[in-house]
Image: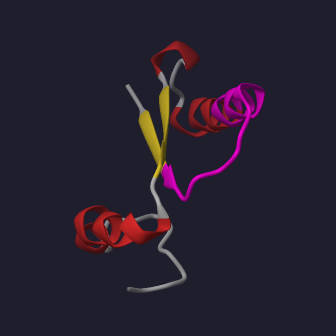
Amino acid sequence: MPHVDIKCFPRDLTEEQKAALASEITETIVRHLKSKARSVSVALTEVPEEAWQDVWDSEIAPQMDALIKKPGYSM
């Protein structure tokens, strides 16, 4: 059951834009992982810029070796 959790700075997305994002991500997961669309879940968590260090410290830096796409920045 693939679950995608997107964390980003706050964005002013409409519900339609969020639905389009989730749909495109779901299509990509289905295509590459051969999952069923009904098995995919997508979360969008907006993190204020001043709190991003916490995301880096708890989720990005400890997983750097496992990331399949590494960030082009460091903290």
Q: Nearer the viewer, residue 41 or 33?
A: 41
- Of 48 and 73, the residue lying toward us: 48
**Quadrant placement of the N terminus:** top left
Residue 39 x, y percent position in the rendering: 46, 18
Q: Residue at x 50, y 84 (%)?
A: 73
Colour convention: secondary structure
Is residue 37 positioned above or below 31 on the image?
above
Residue 63: x, y in percent?
Answer: 28, 67
In the image, residue 21 lies in the stretch drawn in magenta = yes
Q: Residue furthest top?
A: 38
Q: Is residue 47 above or below residue 20?
A: below
Q: Write down the region rendered in magenta.
A: 7-23
Residue occupying image coordinates x 55% and y 59% = 9
Q: Position of residue 45 (x, y in %)?
A: 46, 44
Is 46 left, or right, of 59 in this rendering? right
Q: Residue furthest bottom?
A: 74
Residue ID at (59%, 29%): 30
In this rendering, the answer to whether 43 lies above or below 56 is above
Query: Looking at this view, is 59 or 27 the one in front?
Result: 59
Is 44 a magenta residue?
Answer: no
Residue drawn at 69 percent across, 37 percent down: 21
